[in-house]
Amino acid sequence: MRMGVVDVGSNTVRLVVADVEGGVPLPVHTAKWKLRLSECVEPGGPVPREAVGRLAEAVGAAGVKAQQWGAAGPLAFATAVVRHAPNRAQVLRAVRTETGIELCTLPGEVEAELTFLAARRWMGWQSGPLALFDIGGGSLEVAFGRGRLPDFVASLSLGANRLTREFFDGPDPPTPAQLKALRRTVRHQLRDVAARIRWEGPRTAVATSRTIQQLARLCGAAPGRDGPFTQRVLHRRDLRSARDLLAGLPAAERADLPGISAPRAAQSLAGAVIGHTAMKLTGLTTATICPWAIREGVLLRHIEDGAAWWTDLTQHTDHTPAPPGATPLHIATPTT
């Protein structure tokens, strides 16, 4: 049996087609469409009409590609850039009308739960009590748990792209005052969640997302061509050095550094600030880079719990956009 997942993020629309027999999602095809929605959507603002058209076109193309690879109608979801838009309902309706695909928005807490499940399955039970950090373009998801699903999750408005646009709109590279203001904001929003992580005392910390993967490469981790089974560990001291290096360079020059791509060069500094601050406040000195994240989590949840969980989630979840700032800590009920 083959399944497809479409992930509408801040920068790209990504498709994963995977064989799911045997309980493990094994990818057979991946594709992506660069939209860079975050560049045309102001924080808290609507998705412009022309961007909605491009989004529908990309989702439709992903659906066609999934069918070509033998997968039924894909499970499609959008993350923070659409979730927080005041015209979210119109965007979802336009995509459904144009493509026939039921695009939904997942609450940040659900994103954290699904990403945690993917990390747990990748890392295995030997990882013990597990802390997860997922640095996206529009939000930061944090989770902790001892079982299959997390004991608690939190979704914070600390996305790398969001904070870049909010704090670094001006001189390039940013001034020390701008950098200080960003670090102060990140510390403030992370304070309570970090205290909970310290209290729980995780045995293993895991970080996901393209932003953190690129930062890990900058810090000396193996390149992607070495494959997903190569262990990649990010050390806090190295991330601090990377943060300071990025802070002294304009965005165009950051793209010349190992691992930093041109589309993510501008937000790499904010990503480094978020990652280093999170590790410092939680007392973590290392984090393992996990290649599985939310798309694999969606597939795994579908494999393990059947289709009903997705239908129930998309029909009964309140998708009201979160207000600016941190989402209150959400206590999840673990599923064994």
Image (spheres, rainbow, N blue to C red):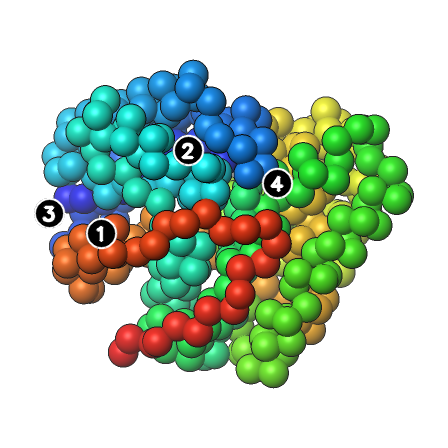
The kind of residue tagged 2 is Asn
N-terminal label among 1 and 3: 3
Task: Look at mark 3 in the image and give the residue it sits on.
Answer: 1
Residue 196 shown left or right of residue 209 in the figure:
right
Q: Earlier in the sequence, mark 4 or mark 3?
A: 3
Q: Nearer the viewer, mark 2 or mark 1?
A: 2
| Kind of residue at badge 1 | Gln
Task: Identify the residue at image location x=33%, y=73%.
Answer: 148
Residue 119, given in percent of the width and then of the height, sits at 41, 62
Disc 4 residue crowd, few under 14, some 14–19, many 20+, Cα 10 Å = many
- Cα separation, mark 4 vs mark 3, equals 38 Å
Q: Quadrant of the C terminus?
A: bottom left
Q: Residue at x 18, y 53 (%)?
A: 311
Image point (34%, 36%), residue name: 89
Q: Give the secondary structure at mark 2.
A: loop
Q: Is residue 275 above or below residue 144?
A: above
Q: Amino acid at mark 3?
A: Met
Can residue 25 be spotted in the picture? Answer: no
Labelled pair 3, 2 in contact (Cβ < 8 Å) = no
Q: Earlier in the sequence, mark 4 or mark 1?
A: 4
Q: Is residue 49 visible?
A: yes
Q: Kindly identify the residue that appears in the image at 38 percent across and 58 percent down.
A: 110
Amino acid tagged 4: Arg
**Label annotation for residue 87:** 2
Front residue of this view, candidates 319 and 115: 319
Which residue carries the number 1 mark? 315
Q: Residues within 10 Å of mark 3 (few under 14, many from 20)?
A: few
- Cα distance in 3D space between marks 1 and 3: 25 Å
Distance, label 3 to label 2, CA atoms, is: 36 Å
